[in-house]
Image (cartoon, rainbow, N blue to C red):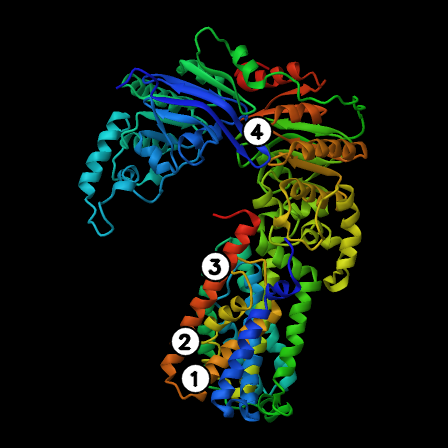
């Protein structure tokens, strides 16, 4: 074994159409060390992991394993070089046994080999023992707890002779106790000489277990493989959020004191939301900030009546209501929702621009027996599409052929055409360019000025500070606190990060 | 990307199947001039008239992104009910038609209701429906046909309206136009395609998925009912096996005609030519006196061809939309 880093990422750059995801990024993982990889959403962490695992190839720069430059064109090659990954989402076959899952790629030498279950279970048991995981390799994965599944995946990665282990948010769905078990295993692996990279949003965990840190911001190194010793939490947060140079100046918006359009009182849901209370007035832009998995989009779906409400009250213009479907939300309460997932939930890419923009007004425009005239839909949607400067050769163009920015404009346009009084916008700028993003922010302000109540969900801190009037901070399906947005980026982002990361604070 | 008028036309859903139909007719009638005798045309059009309704019944469900395996058994149940109402209870034929359409619609809506409410896949629910409706059919008929079909109904199924054009074409024409109109101009049609195109997006856009699914299955049942009763007229009896052989062609015709099996895209003219192609192939095998077992093989091959076309189309769509998997 060499004395150099087990894995060295050297000056790697990667561009995607319209966006530079990684710009001259470096990171070194030493054998026996647990290395934190930090950054806000969109900072480039997942792109970096995808390059290390061979899902993407770098435009420039090198990935060196034990000092040898490697080019991985697919994940198998990366695994063969001793790099194991445990992704954020589980990748196990639930109905298969633990042993089969660990040995999935090695069940037999050829397609017709008879599977030797005894050998598989014996091999799997070896890895389970190493991880102190007391489960029978013959039991199906579906019977395990989430934490046990996590450990099985680590076992699977290690069983491929991995000397480098990348863990993407391994504790996101673990309880405190399960996290402790995981950490004990990680320390043991590190002391056996495995190089571990640990991605997490939970800073206290990072300080507990990691010894070195790499921080990414906007696709660049905010720091490259520094020892964590000597840094404190605020230094790391400072590196993650950087300065407020991206904030544009806006005139302060007048405060409204009118009756709230939407009010939640001690709302709780079947998904685990608890004790959620806030009010949103017409003309106000309320931000909902939190990390991935904080329960924000789920809360939006709850307001739309798509998640079962288990307690508390939802009030529209002061009256307690029970909304039971998105159809009800739109047609009875005039609430619209721009999904964060345009392709899966927002648009029908197969259909035309007109078919997408008009979908919310069909019910309103249909006459007796449901007769619907294209011209009438065009009359209703075309002015909005023109106002939003949607660039399309014709209204009959297939939605999927438009650029991401124009698709997003149509997803917003359909709700403007419907004249909603409350618009929930989930991650407004996913996959769109900076110009359209600025345009959308202006549009959101304009909509609010005309009296629409807006609830905006975003993980993009500068966007949040630019757009929202007030910011509610969520973590673990609960409200952690509220921040009045004075557009002082430094102060606001610090306060928000403080609310998220400090267990006791606020 | 600039497109010439010609390529644009060739990208149309129905141009391909239409060309295949014309070429097939030309080749067969060249080899066997008897293929285009008025009698043969009459037989061909009668088959097309019924099969078009069957295909449309499946098309509505394909549009919403599901499948209806119970289509034939609903058609069969309505067929024998139609004959029984006239033979046993002496219903006037028009009243029996109305009752038959109602039975088909209700049977379809029942499947739709269970699918929408339970969230179990349409495949399973309609598979169960297939057995249930078939069981009711056999319970009523004891597997014996009803022969007491009134003369007016028999005439409707077996006389020509004009030259070689059977009367049966008439209701099919009206219904096809109605289905086209449904998808092009009615809210319910748009909602069906929106749900088939992207169920999540449709639901989040305020479309009532439950009621739309029930509607779609109701319409599908109505179309199956119409097809079943037209077969009674054509066969001049209410046979308990009516509908048993609909399944394969009901999928093949819409898919040949440009429908995407995953939902969201259908073509009525395309489906028509899909029906024509299947009718010509079946008929050609008769004209050339080919063994009936070959018909089965050819139909199977046809399904593979249609599904292959569908896959190509999905890949093309995925590429165009940048969602390739």
Residue A126 against residue A106 in the figure, above or below: above
- Residue A373 rendering spot, x and y as whole percentages: 76, 60
Q: CA distance from mark 3 to mark 4?
A: 46 Å
The residue identified by callout 1 is B285
Q: Which of the numbered marks, if any, corresponds to residue B298?
A: 2
First of labels 2, 3 by sequence position: 2
Residue pictured at 47% horizontal, 47% vertical: B325
- Tell me whether marks 3 and 4 sit on the same chain: no
Instruction: Provide the chain ID for the residue under circle 3.
Output: B
Residue A105 against residue A287 in the figure, above or below: below
Mark 2, other Cα within 10 Å: few <14 / some 14–19 / many ≥20: some
Dots 1 and 2: beta carbons under 8 Å? yes
Taking the view exactly as shown, the residue that stands out farthest to the top is A230
- Residue B269 rendering spot, x and y as whole percentages: 61, 71
Residue A162 against residue A505 in the figure, above or below: below
Dots 2 and 3: beta carbons under 8 Å? no
Instruction: Provide the chain ID for the residue under circle 2.
Output: B
Dividing the picture into quadrants, the one containing residue A186 is top left
Q: CA distance from mark 1 to mark 4?
A: 69 Å
The residue identified by callout 4 is A274
Instruction: Provide the chain ID for the residue under circle 4.
Output: A
């Amino acid at each position: 074994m060499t004395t150099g880093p087990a894995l060295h990422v050297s000056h790697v750059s990667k561009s995607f159409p319209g966006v530079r995801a990684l710009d001259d990024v470096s990171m070194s993982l030493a054998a026996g060390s647990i290395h934190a990889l930090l950054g806000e959403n969109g900072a480039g962490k997942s792109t970096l992991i995808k390059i290390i695992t061979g899902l993407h190839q770098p435009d420039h720069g090198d990935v060196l394993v034990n000092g040898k430059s490697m080019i991985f064109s697919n994940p198998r090659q990366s695994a063969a070089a001793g790099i194991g990954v445990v992704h954020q989402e589980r990748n196990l076959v639930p109905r298969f046994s633990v042993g089969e899952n660990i040995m999935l790629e090695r069940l037999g030498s050829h397609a017709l080999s008879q599977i030797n279950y005894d050998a598989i279970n014996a091999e799997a048991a070896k890895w389970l023992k190493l991880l102190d995981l007391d489960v029978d390799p013959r039991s199906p994965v579906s019977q395990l707890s989430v934490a046990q599944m996590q450990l099985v995946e680590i076992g699977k990665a290690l069983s491929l002779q991995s000397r480098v282990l990348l863990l993407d948010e391994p504790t996101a769905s673990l309880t405190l106790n399960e996290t402790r078990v995981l950490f004990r295993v990680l320390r043991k692996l590190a002391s056996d000489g495995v190089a571990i990279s640990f991605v997490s949003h939970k800073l206290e965990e990072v300080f507990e277990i990691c010894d070195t840190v790499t921080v990414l911001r906007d696709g660049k190194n905010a720091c490259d493989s520094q020892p964590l010793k000597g840094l404190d939490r605020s230094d790391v947060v400072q590196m993650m959020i950087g300065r407020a140079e991206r904030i544009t100046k806006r005139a302060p918006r007048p405060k409204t004191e009118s009756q709230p359009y939407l009010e939640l009182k001690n709302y709780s849901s079947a998904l685990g939301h608890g004790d959620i209370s806030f009010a949103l007035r017409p003309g106000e832009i309320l931000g909902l900030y939190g990390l991935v998995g904080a329960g924000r989009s789920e809360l939006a779906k709850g307001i739309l009546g798509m998640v079962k409400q288990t307690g508390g009250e939802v009030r529209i213009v002061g009256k307690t209501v029970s909304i039971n479907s998105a159809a009800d939300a739109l047609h009875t309460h005039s609430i619209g929702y721009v999904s964060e997932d345009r392709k899966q939930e927002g648009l029908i890419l197969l259909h035309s621009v007109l078919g997408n923009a008009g979908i919310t007004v069909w019910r309103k425009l249909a006459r007796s027996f449901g007769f619907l005239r294209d011209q009438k839909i065009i009359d209703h949607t075309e002015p909005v599409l023109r106002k939003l400067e949607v660039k399309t050769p014709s209204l009959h163009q297939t939605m999927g052929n438009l650029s991401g920015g124009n698709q997003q404009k149509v997803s917003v346009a359909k709700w403007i055409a419907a004249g909603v009084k409350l618009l929930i916008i989930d991650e407004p700028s996913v996959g769109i360019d900076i110009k359209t993003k600025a345009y959308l922010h202006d549009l959101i302000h304009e909509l609010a000025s005309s009296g629409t109540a807006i609830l905006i969900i975003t993980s993009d801190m500068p966007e949040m500070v630019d757009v929202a009037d007030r910011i509610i901070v969520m973590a673990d399906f609960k409200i952690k606190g509220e921040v009045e947005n004075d557009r002082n980026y430094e102060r606001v982002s610090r306060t928000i990060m403080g609310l998220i990361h400090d267990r006791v604070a606020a | 990307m600039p497109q010439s008028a010609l390529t644009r036309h060739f990208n149309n859903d129905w141009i391909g199947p239409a060309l295949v139909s014309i070429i097939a007719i030309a080749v067969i009638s060249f080899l066997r001039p008897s293929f285009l005798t008025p009698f043969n045309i009459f037989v061909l059009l009668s088959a097309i008239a019924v099969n078009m309704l069957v295909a449309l019944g499946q098309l509505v469900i394909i549009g919403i992104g599901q499948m209806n395996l119970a289509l034939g058994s609903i058609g069969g149940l309505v067929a024998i009910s139609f004959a029984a109402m006239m033979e046993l209870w002496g219903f006037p034929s028009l009243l029996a038609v109305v009752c038959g359409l109602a039975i088909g619609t209700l049977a379809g809506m029942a499947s739709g209701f269970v699918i929408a409410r339970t969230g179990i896949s349409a495949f399973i629910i309609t598979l169960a429906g297939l057995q249930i409706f078939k069981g009711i059919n056999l319970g009523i008929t004891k597997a014996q046909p009803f022969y007491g079909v009134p003369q007016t109904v028999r005439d409707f199924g077996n006389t020509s309206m004009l030259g070689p054009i059977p009367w049966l074409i008439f209701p099919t024409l009206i219904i096809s136009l109605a289905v086209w109109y449904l998808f092009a101009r009615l809210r319910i049609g748009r909602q069906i395609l929106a749900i088939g195109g992207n169920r999540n997006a449709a639901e989040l856009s305020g479309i009532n998925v439950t009621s739309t699914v029930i509607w779609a299955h109701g319409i599908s049942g109505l179309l199956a009912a119409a097809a079943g009763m037209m077969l009674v007229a054509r066969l001049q009896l209410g046979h308990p096996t009516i509908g048993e052989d609909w399944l394969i062609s009901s999928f093949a015709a819409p898919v040949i005609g440009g429908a995407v099996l995953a939902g969201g895209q259908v073509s009525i003219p395309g489906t028509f030519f899909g029906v024509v192609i299947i009718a010509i192939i079946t008929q050609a095998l008769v004209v050339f006196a080919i063994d009936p077992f070959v018909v089965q093989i050819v139909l199977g091959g046809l399904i593979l061809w249609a599904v292959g076309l569908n896959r190509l189309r999905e890949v093309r769509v995925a590429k165009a939309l940048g969602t390739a998997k």
